Image (spheres, grey):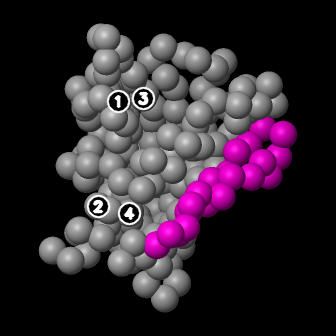
Amino acid sequence: MPSTNTAQVSTPSDREIRIERAFSAPRRLVYDAYTKPELVQRWLGNMPGWTWAKCEMEVRVGGRYHWIWKGPHDAALGISGTYREIVPQQRLVNTEQFDEAWYAGEALDTVVFTESDGRTMVTTTILYVSREVRDGALQSPMAEGMEQGYKALEALLDAESKG
């Protein structure tokens, strides 16, 4: 049964944003949803009017990913990076850079998966190059977009755990 929680956003330092969200699913399944392209495409970037154009992922240390979505009026949104650290079912660390940069520099994303009583807490910490870049991200619709994706992830996890 899907939960009714929402993502909790905080700023643990002057260059970081932390997003925490719990899911009613085992850590193994949540980790798979982050690392298997066929599952990633079912929840990430789940925006009305947008479709996946590219989902390439080489989930290994030093491996790269590149995602592209196509949207209304020939819009495109692309993001890519390199996996820096992988601890299966526990931790992913990767760089993040948009194809058409809307903030300076490259961000570093750390995603930690913690399971307790069949629920998994996903804690994502994004480290930006400066406080100004972090503040710009906070003022963007990033948190709303992430929550929309998390709701799609929750539906995916619910469907996967039943089937």
Tag 4 near tag 3, CB within 8 Å? no
Looking at numbered disc 2 in the image, what kind of residue is underneath it? Answer: Leu
Between residues 116 and 63, which one lies in front from this camera angle? 116
Q: Of discs 3 and 2, which sits in the foreground?
A: 2
- Whether 19 is drawn above or below 155: the answer is above
Q: Which residue is mark 1?
A: 66
Q: Count of labels shown?
A: 4
Q: Where residue 122 sits in the image (x, y, percent)?
A: 53, 63
In primary-sequence order, the first of circles 4 and 3 is: 3
In primary-sequence order, the first of circles 1 and 4 is: 1
- Distance of label 1 from label 2 (alpha carbons): 22 Å
**Label 4 neighbourhood size at 10 Å, few (<14), some (14-19), many (20+)?**
many
Identity of the residue drawn at 30% across and 29% down: 50
Dot 3: element: strand
Q: Where residue 106 sits in the image (x, y, percent)?
A: 60, 26
* Image quarter hosting the N terminus: bottom left
- Distance of label 2 from label 4 (alpha carbons): 5 Å
Tag 2 near tag 4, CB within 8 Å? yes
Tag 1 near tag 3, CB within 8 Å? yes
Looking at numbered disc 3 in the image, what kind of residue is underneath it? Answer: Ser
Numbered tag placed on residue 156 in the rendering: 2
- Distance of label 3 from label 2 (alpha carbons): 23 Å
Tag 1 near tag 2, CB within 8 Å? no
Please give left or right for residue 82 compared with residue 29 in the image.
right
Q: Where residue 103 sits in the image (x, y, percent)?
A: 63, 20
- Whether 120 is drawn above or below 106: the answer is below
Q: Which residue is mark 4?
A: 154
